[in-house]
Image: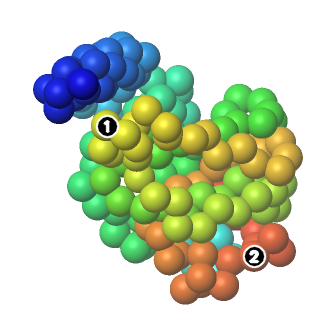
Amino acid sequence: MTTRTQALVPIFIAAVIIGVVGLMSIPSESKLESVEFPRGTIKVDDVPLEVQIADTEPRRVRGLMFQDELPSNQGMIFVFDNPGLYSLWMLNMQFSLDMIWFDGDGKVIHIEKDVPPCKTPLEITTCQSIIPDGQSLYVLEVTSGFVEKNNITKDSILEIISI
């Protein structure tokens, strides 16, 4: 008969291996290093937001990882060089987000509301990427509840004021 210790040792070893592999898979640019984000201003419909701009690969990889909060009048905008299918995930996030994908004309392509963070070891190993319905040029991350509070829909429009 297997003892409790004999049963738990393989599980513990597997958890350590999964954790190490998970940490090794995080690109070096995003590990606890300080990444500076330029700031800008946008509007979604008539709602102004101060945004952190993720317009380079290291900034896009880092995103909002490890930030403790995001005020409701702020966000992060991911800016890509060309339209494409850009997926996001919630690895090492500390709070839930609403995510909105926009095309080059500022039209909404896809909305995800109240996406939970992946911060526990189990959540990190099963953290899913969120894939939009179509190609986008911009992705906006805002605090969970922003979409509902401001009635953001597929008919909403992104206006870039300064980025």
The relative height of residue 47 versus residue 26 in the rendered view (above or below) is: below
Provide residue 109's location: percent of width, then percent of height: 81, 57
Q: Which residue is mark 2?
A: 153
Instruction: Say how many tags the image has.
Output: 2
Secondary structure at numbered mark 1: helix
Q: Amino acid at mark 2?
A: Thr
Locate residue 86: give its quadrant.
top right
Provide residue 22's location: percent of width, then percent of height: 38, 22
The disc label shown at residue 121, or none:
1
Provide residue 143's location: percent of width, then percent of height: 44, 67
Locate residue 20: give its quadrant.
top left
Locate residue 102: give its quadrant.
bottom right
Provide residue 16's location: percent of width, then percent of height: 26, 20
Q: Amino acid at mark 1?
A: Pro
Please tell me which residue lies in front, 90 or 139.
90
Of the residues under marks 1 and 2, which one precedes in the sequence?
1
The relative height of residue 21 versus residue 44 in the rendered view (above or below) is: above
Residue 27 as seen in the image, left or right of residue 57: left
Residue at figure coordinates x 66%, y 39% from the top left:
87
The disc label shown at residue 161, or none:
none
Residue at figure coordinates x 40%, y 43% from the top left:
123
Bin the neighbour count of mark 1 within 10 Å (Cα to Cα): few under 14, some 14-19, many 20 and up: some
Residue at figure coordinates x 59%, y 58% from the top left:
99
Residue 73 as seen in the image, left or right of residue 68: right
